[in-house]
Image (cartoon, helix red, strand yellow):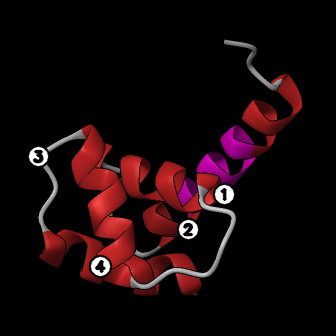
Amino acid sequence: MIINTKRLKKMEEYAVIFDQYLSNKGLKFTKPRRCILETVFNMHTHFNVEELYDKIRAKTNAISLATVYRTIPLLLD
């Protein structure tokens, strides 16, 4: 599998920005939040929360639907 280094670098930039944003709000950049951010970053179409959750569940069972719902507003800010 060829890794698109430009895309990976961009994702890391977003991760740093999101981490700083969360820190300013007194929140942590947890593994579930990172997984949600990465999944959103890799979705190239419009989606709803349930579709996002389905994509995440294909990777891990460790993230609840409630966590996804609570993280979306943080990503939108």
Secondary structure beneath label 3: loop
Do tag 3 and tag 2 residues touch (Cβ < 8 Å)? Answer: no
Closer to the N terminus: mark 4 or mark 1?
A: 1
Amino acid at the residue labelled 4: Glu
Q: Earlier along the polypeptide chain: callout 4 or callout 2?
A: 2
Residue 15: x, y in percent?
Answer: 60, 48
The image shows residue 28 at horizontal and vertical percentages of 32, 56
Secondary structure at numbered mark 1: helix
State the SS at label 2: helix
Mark 4 → mark 2, Cα distance in angstroms: 25 Å
Q: Which residue is mark 2?
A: 21
* Number of numbered labels in the structure image: 4
Can you name the residue that lies furthest to the right here? 6
Q: Main secondary structure of the magenta part?
A: helix
**What residue does disc 3 label?**
61
Q: Kindly check if marks 1 and 2 are in contact, taking CB atoms under 8 A apart as contact.
A: yes
- Residue at 36%, 56% in the rendered image: 55
Residue 17 marker: 1
Q: CA distance from mark 3 to mark 2?
A: 26 Å
- Above or below, 21 relative to 56: below
Which is closer to the viewer, label 4 or label 1? 4
Tell me if label 4 and label 2 are in contact, CB under 8 Å. Answer: no
Q: Which mark is residue 50?
A: 4
